Image (cartoon, grey):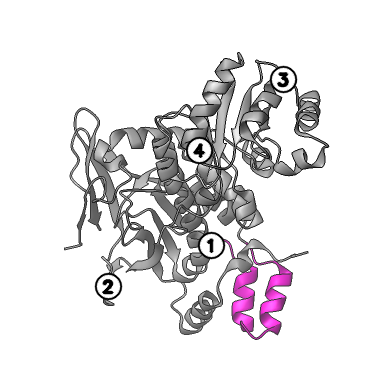
Amino acid sequence: MNDFAPAMLTDQYELTMVSAALQDGTADRRSVFEVFARRLPTGRRYGVAAGQGRLIELIREFRFHERDVDFLRKAGIVDETTAAWLTDYRFTGDIDGYAEGELFFPGSPILTVSGGFAECVVLETLILSVLNHDSAIASAAARMVTAARGRPIIEMGSRRTHEEAAVAAARASYLAGFASTSNLAAGGRYGIPTTGTSAHAFTLLHDDEPAAFASQVAALGKNTTLLVDTYDIAQGIRNAIAVAGPDLRAIRIDSGDLSVLAQHSRELLDSLGATETKIVVSGDMDEYAISSLAAEPVDMYGAGTAVVTGSGAPTAGLVYKLVEVEGRAVVKRSENKATVGGRKTAIRRHKPTGTATEEIVVSQGVPDHHANDRLLQRSFIAGGEPAPLATLAESREHLRQCLISIPWEGLKLSAGDPAIPVTVVPTA
């Protein structure tokens, strides 16, 4: 069993910087770091900022325990001065950023971390790990929700990712608008509705398909979903209705040409009197597959591999960069990786109708406000003390409203410009 504290997710290079800064006296210089994306993944028109709720809780508990420090000392990774600093570590700075569920674009200052250099730099890996993962999942999931056009989607990708990533992915998917998850840990930890059917293994366990269906209905009642494509789908549907009756809640199809099968299944169900029995489809569902079934009689989707891997973009591409030291803007000038120095303030500009038109980002200043502007950043931690966090339900509703606000072109699945432009005004 791994007894190391979450703080040990820190990369060694961060401790190298901490050790050197402690030695040369720069560790406590007031510094500002920002999290942002230089670009969106290919084909994407917006990103969804997600993971802030998880992150702030992790930072609250970010400690180097005695076992951790002892390991670092014995391995020669830190000296005694750094070991003592890690033992006493508590984040005492400030963290501001975009609300969880907020949309972001290239250059958006998603998170701003300020405090002593050392106390901020040691958080880099944790911050990027959480935000890059959760934002990637939520961004993909939001596109799937849009493609589903109001039909529910079940997150069912736990078997396609790391065990803890599965729980975080379920949370991020629900934030983005998924209806439920098959991951029970996510249900217990975050109160997300859970659902599930059986697998082909359960059907194969029994002597025949009707026996498997009868067992499932006997245990769970008719408000269950029977998997009908283990053998022949048409016969599977007949068996399901024969066993459960026409008031069976749903059937699930997990393979084949889902467009054709959905049509045939609906016709067959209706002919058997099961006009209210729903059709759930799963099997390599991404936003494009979901969109392709928009005209078919599908009632619910199950998404797995695609959503937990970001549907082709497994990271949001977020970076964590130092932009200010002791009130002085600092910049990185590396080719293709240049930064804009100074702490940023961001607003989103809207038409009177509520449609977003532009994001304005100002360095070391505040943008001019208009009547329909919305300030994007809020306080998460002030002086080391966390502010009240939005609930997952509140963040879910915030994202829903954000997606309503962007121009309809920004919701297209085809490649194109970001949904709204971002204007970054550098420091004078």
Which one is nearer the viewer's eye here, 409 or 406? 409
Which one is nearer the viewer's eye here, 338 or 119? 338
Residue 219, horizontal then vertical, whole percent:
80, 27
Please give left or right for residue 121 compared with residue 164 in the image.
Answer: left
Residue 287, horizontal then vertical, whole percent:
42, 44
Whether residue 299 is visible to the viewer of this picture, yes or no, is no
- Does 360 appear in magenta? no
Residue that label 4 marks: 258
- For the residue carrying disc 3, how many other residues have a C-alpha within 10 Å: few (<14), some (14-19), or many (20+)? some
Residue 242 marker: 3
The residue under label 2 is which amino acid type?
Asn
Please give left or right for residue 419 compared with residue 35 in the image.
Answer: left
Q: Give the range drawn in magenta.
A: 63-90
What is the tally of numbered marks visible in this picture? 4
Q: Determine the image quadrant of residue 326.
A: bottom left
User: Quick check: marks 2 and 3 in contact, CB under 8 Å?
Assistant: no
- Considering only vertical position in the picture, is 127 above or below 322? above
Q: Separation of disc 4 and disc 1 at Cα?
A: 41 Å
Q: Which of marks 4 and 3 is nearer the N terminus?
A: 3
- For the residue carrying disc 2, how many other residues have a C-alpha within 10 Å: few (<14), some (14-19), or many (20+)? few
Query: In front: mark 4 or mark 1?
Result: 4
Q: Separation of disc 2 and disc 4 at Cα?
A: 44 Å
Residue 126 marker: 1
The residue under label 1 is which amino acid type?
Leu
